[in-house]
Every structure is written in structure tokens, then in C-alpha cells.
Amino acid sequence: MTSVTDSDGQQGTEERRGLAALVFDSRARSLFFQGVLALIIIGLIWLALQNAAQNLADQNKEFGFDFFDRPSDIQILTTFGTWLLDYEPGQSTIFDVFLLSIANTLIVAIAGIFFATIWGFLLGIFRLSSNFVLRGFATVYIELLRNVPLLLQIFFWTAVMRIVAPSERGVYYTLVPGLLQFDAKGIYGPFPIVEDGFIFTLLAFIAACVGAWAYARWAKKRQDKTGQPSPVLLVTLGLIVVVPTLVYLVSGRPVTIEWPNYVTEGPIFRQGFEMGVGSYIAPEFMALFLALFTYTAAFIAEIVRAGIQAVPEGQSEAAGALGLPDGLTMRKVVLPQAFRVIVPPLTSQYLNLTKNSSLAAAIGYPELVAAFAGTILNQVGRAIEIIAVVILVYLTISLLTSAFMNWFNNRVALVER
């Protein structure tokens, strides 16, 4: 009995020691408090949902997403989204409005990011240039646009579009001779119409891109192994341009160009460019696009300048000692090292540009907030559902953008030895 008692006492002591060790274990304490915090957050969310459900029940309001199937009779500005989904008031649904508003948001965000990146990198390089004119222009541009609210710049470009356009009915100006014209209603240009057989040209273009990518990888491995460079740029351009062009010509040119039609006959109120013929860009889109990319480019320029200045000057001096010209030194030596500093804050600017597109509601461009969270919300009155959907869309776009930029950052990061 004594041995059994001693064994039980020793076991209890070991259990107490195990509990004490668990209490003093920093990792165990961290997991415990994180679990408690997670339960508190879940409880608060549950209480908020219960409170919202009770308030909706007291007001005799329903909760659900059945309104997406309702027909939409609202008039929407002709944009990329309305053309893509062939939107017709009274025939299309609210879900079509939701999709076209996402398309309008994405097209202005993608176009803005593309041009803001190019213009911002040029301004950042100009800011460090030894040329006084380029440096002064970049400095004034950056300081001016960074310190003026974006909403005011959107209003400014909207006013510019109205002032530049002809005010008289039946009068239009030429933006690009033989290509683009514009009047008070927007910009008009040619539109390609795809015919049978174009699929072969598209497949040839895809195959050319894959071939160019494979050649670039082979050329890089060859240069790392032998030190001999290959004409990657010329071969890439040759594959991407020549191969699809040859297939396009052989297949009988399966693309026709539809030009805008200017109507001069008939009642005076019908004179002007015929809608639905050729391509059309609304002035609201142009004002928003110009404001977003010029504003964001000023911030990108400062990011590029900081990234370049973070590279030790000895790198440029060593490149100069080897006889490399300034342009080649910037492209091959400085910028690859500066990307480590540039890419992380550049991601934030891309996200800001996408979210700043919601300011288009001020000028009537039908993006996600204006068309869906604004007009549709006023029609159906489902505030919680609509706002939640809009939040999820912006969250999805932001997470995808961040994931791509993180992947790109890992690709351009220098490998430490």
C-alpha cells in the first residue's frame, strides 16, 4: 500500500509540474490567449448579426440576395461594361448591373495602373536627372499633384473635357487624324470586328508568347553558363509580331474595321456620331482615368526615386568604370537592385488607385460604388447585402493584386549568397 501511495503521490506531483510548465510555456500561453481573443471576436460578430437580424425583423424587412434576379430599368452611361454585357434597360437584370460595374472598375483600374507605372517611373528617373529642365519639371509636377486632393483633380479633368470639346451641336474635332474624333458626348474611333478564322491568329499569338518565354529562359541559362548574351528582345519581337501576322494574312485577314459613322442628315437633334457604330469612350471615363493615373504617378515617382537612391553609388561608379553608358547602367545595374525597395510600396499605390476609383460616383461614371452601391441600393433597399457584396469585391481585387505583387517581388528579389 505504501508503494502504491508513493506512486500516486509522485504521479500527482508530476501532473502538477506538467501544468506549471504549461502555464510558464510562452508558446502555450500565446495559443491560449489567441484562442480566447478569437472566441471574443466570433461572439461579437454573432451578437452584431443577431442585432441586425432583430432590427430587420422589427422593420418587416427581408434579408437575402434574391434581388439579383430582378430586371433593371435604370439608364446607364455607355461604357466598357455595358458593351461587354450588352446591357439593355428593362431586359437585363440587377446581376448584369453588378457585373458591368465590376468590369468598369477593373478597366479603369488596369488602365490607370499601367500608365501610372510607366509615367511614374519616368518621373522618378527625371527627378534624379542631371538635366535641369527634366529635374525641375518632375519636381514641380510631383509636388503639385501630390498636394491637391484627388477629388478636385477629377473635377478638374471633367471640366477640361467639357471645355476642350466643341459646344456646338453637329461639330466635332479630330484628336488623331484618320483615327479618333471627339465631340461633347465623347471620343469615337474604329472598332475591330472578328470573323471566322481569327482563332488561328489568336492561337499563333499564344504560341509565339510561349516560344518567346521559352527562348528568354534558355538565353538566360546560356548567359549564366557561358557569359554570352543572346538577342532576346529582337527574337521576342520577331516571334510575337511576325508569326501572328503571317497567320493572319494566310487565314484571309479575318478582322474587319468598323469606323464611326457621322450622321449629317435628318433632324438637328439627331446629327452626330451614330451610337453603337465603332468604338466609344465616355468623357467621364477619360476624366477619371486621367485623374487617377496622373495623381498616382506622382507617388510612384517618389517611390522610384527613393529606390534608386537606396542603391549604393559605388554600383553606378563601377558600371561607369566598365564603360557602360548611363541608360544601360540604369536598366541593368541600378533598377534591378532598386526593385527590392520599390515593389512593396508600389503595391500599396496599386491598391490605392483601385479603391480611389470609387470617387467616380462624383462625376457619374458607373463603377461599382456609383452603379451598384448607389443606384441599385436606392432601388431595392438591401443596404446590408449590397454593402457586404461591394466590400467582398474590393477585398478580392486587393488580395489578388497583393498576391501577384508578392509573387513579382519574389521573382525580382536578388538572391543572397
Image: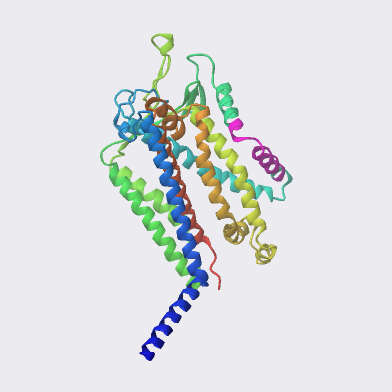
With 229 as the anchor, is 323 left or right in this view? Answer: right
Residue 96, quarter of picture: top left
- Residue located 51% across and 72% down the image: 25
> In the rendered image of this protein, does residue 125 appear above or below residue 93?
below
Which residue is farthest front?
Answer: 1
Q: Which residues are magenta?
A: 135-153
Closer to us: 176 or 38? 38
Quarter of the image for residue 214 reads bottom left
Image quarter of residue 64: top left
Chief secondary structure of the magenta span?
helix
Decide whether residue 389 is among the magenta residues: no
Q: How far across and down, in percent of the image, does residue 23 sit?
A: 50, 71
Task: Name the quadrant of the N terminus.
Answer: bottom left
Task: Please provide percent x and percent y for residue 54.
Answer: 38, 36
Q: Going by the picture, which residue comes out furthest to the left?
A: 196
Question: Can I make out residue 8 in this image?
Answer: yes
Q: Nearer the viewer, residue 142 or 10?
A: 10
Q: Is residue 124 above or below residue 272?
A: below
- The x, y position of residue 130, in whole percent, is 72, 50
Classify 191 as above or below 219. Answer: above
Q: Is 138 part of what is drawn in magenta?
A: yes
Q: Say above or below: 49 vs 22.
A: above
Residue 227: tell me if it is visible: no
- For the point 57% across and 52% down, the residue is 345
The image's colour scheme reads rainbow
Please provide percent x and percent y for residue 7.
39, 87
- In front: 226, or 356? 356
Q: Nearer the viewer, residue 61 or 364?
A: 61
**Quadrant occupied by the C terminus:** bottom right
The count of marks equals 0
Residue farthest along the top direction in this orientation? 267
